[in-house]
Amino acid sequence: MIQATNHDGNDVVDWTAVLSQFGGRQEFVAKLTGIALQAFADLPEKIAQSIVERDLRNLGFQAHSVKGICANFNAPQVLALALATEQSAKDGNAEQALTRGEELVPLLRAMLENISAWRHANTGGQ
Amino acid sequence: MSNKPQTPQDEFITTREAARLLGVGLSTVQGWVEAGILPAWKTAGGHRRIPVASIDELRRKQLAVLDAAQKPGKPTVLFIEDDPVQRMVYEDQIARMAHDLGIEINLVMATNVFEGLLLTGQQTPNLIITDLMMPGMDGYHLIQELHAKLKPSVAIVVVTMLNQDEVMARGTIPKGIKVLTKPVAYEVLLEVIRSHIGRGTLPSRGTP
């Protein structure tokens, strides 16, 4: 089971940075978490499917979508891996793209779990 | 693309007629047909024919979205963005901006390039802020078409997760179109709004 923290035991998402980005408005960030969880719940599975099908075009696009999530939920590790996956896919470096994609899937799951956990802790699970 | 259906010839129109009715470019309609967004069949000579009913449906969609958003006489900003979280962030930023500037802004949201082109076919916004990498038709096609159709009256700003080198490597952005990297801070978006809409009507920088 992937934990919602990185190897240092810290959150995957830098919540201090996220709250700072949105002026400390916890209620608004909570709204965003709800939308993100709904919109991206199946993204890890979609990426996994692209890897199975060796579909670099979709994999690159999905990695780009992960970068987009990181624009509003600051997650440096996830962003770096999504960037590397997208770049490898774009370059046509299949093995590297697939390997990086395989690493991205659990990290993205951990990120979504972290978002869910933050939401639960800050909205009482609503 | 399907075979010719068993319905009267006069219920179908050409791609050129469809483009005129929808207010979009011919290549856009052709792209929608190829992508399966618009149903069509081909004549023996290879010409596409599109059901009038599907065009009517798209026009109804254009008008419905615009009716929902329209506040006559106010500047209109069209955002084209597939990420729902980012759309929520834009909505929040524009609402705060309208409050801070003491103005009303028509905010129109398109969730993909298809909707974006459809909406600009019906109404000309003052400013278009668009993502670049979106499913289906990408933002480069959109920008080329909008730039050709709306230039120079409408400002287009690109907001993307690509860096400047990637933006240039993947396609062509016409000169004069500003490219910003996500996330776009409130102050940066505020400057975009100030410089591109309501020239002379918005309070200048530093105005309380």
Image (cartoon, coloured by chain):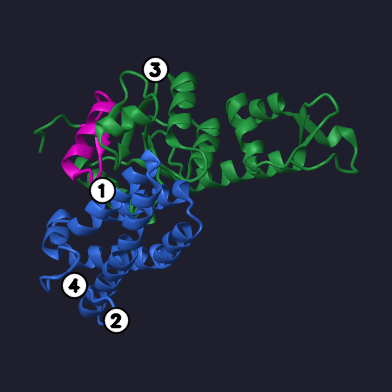
Chain colours: A blue, B green
Q: CA distance from mark 3 to mark 4?
A: 49 Å
Residue linked to disc 4? A5
Q: In the rendered structure, are the residues bearing label 2 and label 4 in contact, judged by CB atoms less than 8 Å apart?
A: no
Badge number at residue A125:
2
User: What's under tag 2, amino acid-wise?
Assistant: Gly
Judged by depth in the image, the label closer to the viewer, 3 or 4, is 4
Q: Position of residue A65 (x, y in %)?
A: 36, 52
Q: Identify the chain of the residue marked 4, using the numbered disc in the image.
A: A
Q: Nearer the viewer, residue A56 or B190?
A: A56
**Mark 2 residue crowding within 10 angstroms, few (<14) / some (14–19) / many (20+):** few
User: What's under tag 1, amino acid-wise?
Assistant: Gln
Residues flagged by tags 4 and 1 on a common chain: no
Q: Earlier in the sequence, mark 2 or mark 4?
A: 4
Judged by depth in the image, the label closer to the viewer, 2 or 4, is 4
Residue linked to disc 3? B152
Residue linked to disc 1? B93
User: What's under tag 4, amino acid-wise?
Assistant: Thr
- Residue placed at 45% from the left, 24% from the top? B144
